[in-house]
Image (cartoon, grey):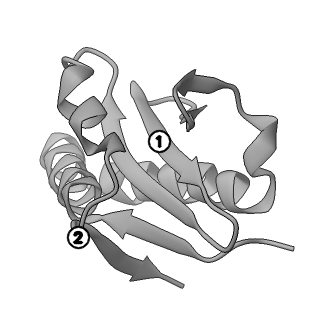
């Protein structure tokens, strides 16, 4: 059974921005990126405890073929995606999102 997924607003923005960037590099590459991130999110939703804790209660799914990871919190009744994050960026950016805030809320079906 998979848990419902909610995206932090910043994670949604990162996902959209990265998708747009990949599309400027090659037509169709954004679709490949979105498919891979969706696969990562689905894995987190279906098997959240399979992924190692990287900080406090935050877990990570590493994307294939793209230098991105999906950082998430597994709650009792949902998964909260905190970041769709490029591996070369400063992790302190997403780490500030680990505090539960009103910024969590964009649902994904």
**Left or right position of 61 against 80:** right
Marks 2 and 1: CB-CB under 8 Å?
Answer: no
| Residue at the image position 73 percent from the left and 49 percent from the top | 48
| Residue at the image position 25 percent from the left and 14 percent from the top | 88
| Depth order, front residue of 90/55 | 55
**Left or right position of 37 against 28:** right
Q: From the image, which quarter does the N terminus lie in?
A: bottom right
| Residue 46 vertical position relative to residue 29 in the rendered view, above or below | below
Label of residue 70 in the image:
1
Q: Identify the residue under disc 2.
A: 102
For label 1, the SS is strand
Q: Splitting the image into 4 quarters, where does residue 31 fall?
A: bottom left
Mark found first going from the N terminus, 2 or 1:
1
Label of residue 31 in the image:
none
The image shows residue 109 at horizontal and vertical percentages of 54, 85
Q: Splitting the image into 4 quarters, where does residue 5 fall?
A: bottom right
For label 2, the SS is loop
The image shows residue 62 at horizontal and vertical percentages of 56, 30
User: What's the distance in space between the residues labelled 2 and 1, CA to CA?
Assistant: 20 Å
How many labels, in total? 2
| Depth order, front residue of 90/97 | 97
| Depth order, front residue of 69/20 | 69
Q: Nearer the viewer, mark 2 or mark 1?
A: 2
Q: Residue furthest right?
A: 1
Q: Neighbour class for label 1 at 10 Å: few (<14), some, many (≥20)? A: many
The image shows residue 24 at horizontal and vertical percentages of 12, 48
The image shows residue 105 at horizontal and vertical percentages of 32, 76
């Amino acid at each position: 059974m998979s848990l419902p997924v909610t995206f932090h607003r910043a994670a949604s923005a990162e996902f959209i921005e990265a998708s747009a960037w990949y599309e400027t590099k090659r037509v169709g590459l954004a679709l490949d990126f979105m498919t891979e991130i969706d696969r990562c999110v689905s894995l987190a939703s279906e098997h959240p405890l399979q992924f190692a804790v990287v900080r406090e209660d935050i877990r990570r799914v590493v994307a294939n073929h793209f230098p991105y990871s999906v950082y998430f919190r597994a709650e009792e009744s949902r998964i909260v995606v905190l970041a769709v994050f490029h591996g070369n960026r400063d992790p302190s950016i997403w780490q500030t999102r680990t505090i539960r805030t009103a910024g969590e809320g964009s649902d994904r079906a």
